[in-house]
Image (tube, grey):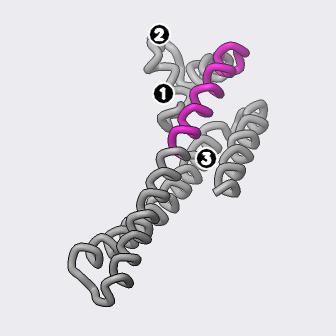
Amino acid sequence: MIEGKSQVQAYIDAGYSVNAKTESSIYEMASKLLKNNKIMTRYNELKSELKDKALWTREESINDLKWIKEQSRKTIEEYGEVKHAPATAYLGAITELNKLGVLYDLEVEKLKLNIEKQRKELANDQSQEDKIKQLQDAITEVINHE
């Protein structure tokens, strides 16, 4: 599920037998397994690690690009003219910063679509509403933290 898979797909990929089982019973078993405290704890640990890694990578990328942009701007100001290398670096850094913003927006949209997909899968299982709400709250927290 950390990779964006559904509970059912994660259950199957983990190697649990689905032979001669209905889709509904597979879903029930996957849901029951996720309710296991040890599994939920590990799932939350992995989710947290992934979130921390993604935020660090994004933050470092932005900081490095800002540094390149600032150094290029200083070089342009110092020499009083636009030289090719600093100007190219400056424009490249701005372009990359803009791309990061677009990628972030795409990731947010992907998360929203994943929530909607899981919500449809769980439509008949009221016990999953709390989990959906927790997932939405966690995503909202990440988005608002940015």
Q: Nearer the viewer, residue 118 or 45?
A: 45
* In the image, farthest residue toward the left: 84
Looking at the rendering, the stretch of residues picked out in magenta corresponds to: 33-54
Residue 15 in the figure: left or right of residue 133? left
Q: Residue beneath label 3, please?
A: 115
Instruction: Count residues near mark 3 (Cα–Cα under 10 Å), then give few for <14, some for 14-19, many for 20+.
Output: some
Task: Tell me the number on the disc at residue 17.
Answer: 2
* Mark 1 vs mark 2, CA separation in Å: 12 Å
- Amino acid type, mark 3: Ile
* In the image, farthest residue toward the front: 78
What kind of secondary structure does the magenta stretch mostly adopt?
Answer: helix
Which residue appears at 57% of the width and 40% of the height? 51
* Mark 3 vs mark 1, CA separation in Å: 15 Å
Q: Percent position (x, y) of residue 120?
A: 61, 44
Residue 35 in the figure: left or right of residue 20? right
- Amino acid type, mark 1: Gln
Tell which circle, 3 or 2, labels the residue nearer the N-terminal end. 2
- Amino acid type, mark 2: Ser
* Residue 94 is inside the magenta segment: no
Q: Residue beneath label 1, please?
A: 9
Q: Is mark 2 on a helix, strand or loop?
A: loop
